[in-house]
């Protein structure tokens, strides 16, 4: 039975170590609590699985010598299953309750990034991944911002945070945008078509999302002076989801660029500009 006790204590130590590692890795995260609970949940499932496999194999190889401990081994297998299931269920409910969105959301907003007259294409997904970014906040090689999951802090899904998630940067003095040809960096004060350029963000937004069946979507354009405060509108389809134009060009009040989804909707007569 020394092997049995030793194995069980080993996995308990592994379980504790996994929690510590998950905590240390998540302290610097924007949504600390959500990342921490996610790490804990992964640890709970992983370690529970190891414990179950260990005791099943132990019983298979030492069936005769452990005959009198069948009940104990049964509970040693069942208890991790029950505890990890309860933890997963409890943490899921808790995260949903404390989130700004009160549960998972599925929001989309299309975007285009322009450097003078050149439209930039975001770097393609790498390896087996079908997205650039995180599970919550990403792009699928479709020029579309995807917000898919539980949003603890709504401020973390702003357009400036999206640039950080894709390993770029967007701020009032410039932007960095990763493309297949490399990182494109622009800064205010550089020249664009022999004129001083400035990073500007324009937003196309539907103003009557509930009346589309009656008269078509009506949209308006505005320049976002404080784009750090912007988060995508709560729609999964585009339109009525937003169209965001990030442009480095001479300073102006409006842009002529328009997302492909808005352009095709206009051609079909489903979208009317104001």
Image (tube, rainbow, N blue to C red):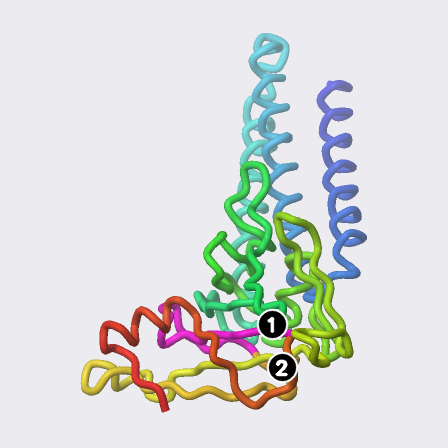
Whichever of callouts 2 and 1 sits on the residue coming sooner in the sequence is 1
Please identify the residue farthest to the left as the structure is shown: 214
Label 2 environment density (alpha carbons within 10 Å; few <14, some 14–19, many ≥20) = some
User: Which label belongs to residue 132?
Assistant: none
Query: Which SS type dominates the magenta stretch?
Result: loop
Question: Can the viewer see residue 237?
Answer: yes
Q: Where residue 111 sits: x, y (%)?
A: 51, 68
Mark 2 and mark 1 residues within 8 Å of each other at the beta carbon: yes
Residue receiving disc 2: 227
Residue receiving disc 1: 159
Residue 154 included in the magenta stretch of the image:
no
Q: Magenta span covers which residues? A: 231-248
What's the distance in space between the residues labelled 2 and 1, CA to CA? Answer: 7 Å
Q: Where residue 188 sits: x, y (%)?
A: 75, 77
Query: Which residue lies at the image location 73% right of the left edge and 74% below the top edge?
Result: 191
Report the quarter where the C terminus lies.
Answer: bottom left
Q: Where residue 215 sits: x, y (%)?
A: 21, 87
Report the quarter where the N terminus lies.
Answer: top right
Above-or-below relation of 21 to 52: below
Q: Nearer the viewer, residue 82 or 42?
A: 42
Query: Which residue lies at the image location 55% right of the left edge and 22% below the top edge?
Result: 70
Label 1 environment density (alpha carbons within 10 Å; few <14, some 14–19, many ≥20) = many
Query: Which residue lies at the image location 41% right of the left edge and 74% below the top edge?
Result: 241
Dot 1 falls on a residue whose secondary structure is: helix
Above-or-below relation of 226 to 264: below
Please identify the residue farthest to the front as the structure is shown: 194
Dot 2 falls on a residue whose secondary structure is: helix
Query: Which residue lies at the image location 53% right of the left edge and 50% below the top edge?
Result: 131
Q: Where residue 159 sits: x, y (%)?
A: 60, 72
Question: Can the viewer see residue 36?
Answer: no
- Left or right, 41 with reference to 268: right
């Amino acid at each position: 039975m020394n092997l049995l006790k030793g194995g069980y204590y080993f996995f308990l130590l592994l379980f504790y170590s996994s929690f510590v590692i998950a905590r240390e890795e998540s302290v610097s995260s924007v949504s600390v609590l959500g990342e921490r609970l996610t790490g804990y949940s992964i640890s709970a499932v992983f370690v529970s699985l190891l414990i179950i496999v260990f005791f099943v194999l132990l019983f298979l190889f030492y069936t005769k010598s452990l005959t009198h401990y069948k009940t104990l081994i049964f509970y040693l297998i069942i208890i991790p299953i029950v505890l990890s299931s309860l933890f997963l269920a409890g943490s899921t409910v808790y995260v949903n309750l404390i989130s700004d969105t009160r549960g998972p959301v599925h929001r989309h907003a299309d975007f285009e990034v322009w450097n003078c007259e050149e439209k930039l294409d975001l770097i393609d997904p790498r390896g087996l991944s079908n997205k650039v970014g995180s599970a919550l906040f990403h792009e699928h090689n479709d020029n579309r911002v995807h917000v898919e999951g539980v949003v603890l802090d709504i401020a973390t899904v702003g357009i400036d945070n999206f640039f950080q998630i894709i390993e770029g940067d967007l701020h009032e003095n410039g932007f960095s945008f990763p493309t297949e040809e490399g990182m494109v960096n622009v800064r205010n004060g550089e020249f664009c078509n022999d004129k001083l350029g400035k990073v500007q963000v324009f937003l196309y937004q539907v103003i009557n999302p509930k009346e589309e069946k009656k008269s078509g979507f009506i949209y308006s354009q505005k320049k976002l002076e404080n784009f750090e405060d912007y988060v995508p509108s709560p729609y999964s389809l585009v339109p009525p989801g937003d169209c965001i134009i990030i442009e480095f060009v001479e300073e102006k009040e409006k842009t002529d660029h328009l997302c492909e989804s808005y352009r095709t909707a206009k051609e079909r007569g489903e979208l009317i500009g104001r």
